[in-house]
């Protein structure tokens, strides 16, 4: 064990929730059973707790959290004033408990991530890891589309230079030191997987099999997954801008080739005057220009959001 690191750390299990009234009662019961089991085995401190973050739910999610808090003081919570998004909800939970824990674990409310991996995560923490990533062993429970898009995303991020952990989502353990470092990241466009990979502290991985969702439906639609992937790509890579440069070079070389072809056609064969020399380069270069403007526009939009420095989330109610 690392010198100075407690054998019974104060642990917070942070659970972001958005419209999870169907599955949340069972999930909280499972997490509480695990929490009390770990306390009984002295693997964590008696001061450990669950911390639910209601990300502006429109159903009975907050009512369920409130009732559970009244029945058991180990359940604490934070209600955001509006839906701030999954990443901001996680960030709100982490920053709110940073002074009250030695480490924290983030896990989604559907418990598709295996809670039985948590004791192993704690072992890695006690051995000195500041970040312990929960990594899926396979994606056999995913649909073909989700599996294909996820693998494409991770490969694209690796290719673009971001060192994110393959097949890791947001199931992880973080030491207090890591949580406090989050205060130094001021960006409005939050992509936590990329942020933690930038920090450079000692990390390790725990592999697990992902469970099938028991009740309700996932709140991460294909649109949201694509949005998160795009957020990660443009927040932690300049690859799209480099793509514009490469496209420009290819366009220039192709234009030279087209010019040679058009001149050859004009002098050595019969062509309709002006057709080839106008239509082909116009379509090709026009497409490249529109794509380039779109990519630059996305970066400018992100800069616009950062410059305004609006709060990433607004707290409504907290249960201590």
Image (cartoon, rainbow, N blue to C red):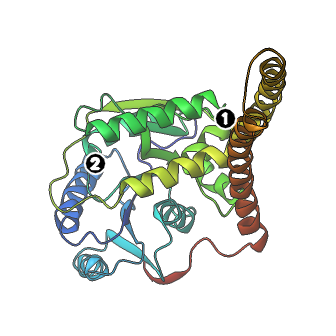
Q: Is residue 292 left or right of residue 18?
A: right
Which quarter of the picture shows residue 119? top left
Q: Which quarter of the rendered picture does the C terminus lie within?
A: bottom left
| Percent coordinates x, y for residue 139 in the rendering | 29, 33
Q: Is residue 279 left or right of residue 56?
A: right
10 versus 62 height, above or below: above
Q: Which residue is mark 2?
A: 38
| Percent coordinates x, y for residue 138 in the rendering | 30, 28
Nearest-to-viewer mark from 1 and 2? 1
Q: Which residue is mark 1?
A: 200
Q: Kindly identify the residue that appears in the image at 48 percent across and 83 percent down.
A: 81
Q: Do we see residue 102 in this rendering? A: no
Residue at the extreme top of the image, as rendered: 268
301 versus 125 height, above or below: below
- Which element type, helix, strand or loop, lies under badge 1? loop
- In depth, the one of 11 and 19 nearer the eye is 19
Q: Kindly identify the residue that appears in the image at 73 percent across and 22 percent down.
A: 270
- Which element type, helix, strand or loop, lies under badge 2? helix
């Amino acid at each position: 064990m690392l010198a100075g690191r407690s054998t019974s750390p104060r642990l917070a299990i942070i659970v972001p929730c958005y419209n999870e009234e169907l599955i949340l009662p069972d999930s909280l019961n499972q997490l509480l059973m695990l929490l009390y089991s770990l306390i009984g085995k002295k693997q964590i401190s008696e001061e450990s707790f669950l911390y639910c973050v209601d990300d502006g739910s429109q159903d009975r999610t907050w009512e369920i959290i409130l009732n559970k808090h009244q029945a058991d003081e180990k359940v604490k919570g934070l209600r955001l004033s509006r839906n701030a998004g999954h990443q901001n909800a996680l960030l709100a939970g982490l920053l709110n408990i940073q002074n009250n824990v030695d480490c924290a674990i983030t896990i989604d409310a559907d418990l598709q991530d295996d809670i039985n991996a948590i004791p192993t995560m704690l072992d890695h923490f006690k051995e000195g890891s500041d970040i312990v990533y929960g990594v899926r062993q396979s994606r056999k429970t995913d649909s073909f589309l989700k599996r294909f898009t996820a693998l494409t995303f991770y490969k694209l991020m690796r290719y673009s230079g971001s060192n994110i952990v393959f097949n890791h989502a947001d199931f992880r353990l973080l030491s207090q030191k890591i949580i406090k470092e989050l205060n130094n990241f001021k960006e409005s466009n939050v992509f936590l997987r990329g942020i933690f990979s930038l920090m450079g502290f000692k990390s390790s991985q725990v592999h697990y099999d992902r469970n099938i969702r028991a009740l309700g439906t996932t709140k991460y639609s294909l649109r949201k997954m694509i949005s998160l992937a795009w957020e990660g790509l443009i927040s932690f890579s300049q690859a799209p801008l480099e793509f514009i440069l490469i496209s420009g070079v290819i366009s220039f070389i192709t234009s030279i080739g087209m010019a040679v072809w058009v001149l050859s056609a004009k002098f050595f064969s019969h062509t309709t005057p002006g057709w080839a020399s106008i239509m082909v380069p116009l379509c090709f270069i026009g497409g490249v220009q529109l794509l380039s403007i779109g990519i630059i526009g996305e970066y400018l939009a992100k800069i616009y959001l950062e410059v305004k420095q609006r709060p990433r989330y607004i707290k409504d109610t907290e249960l201590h």
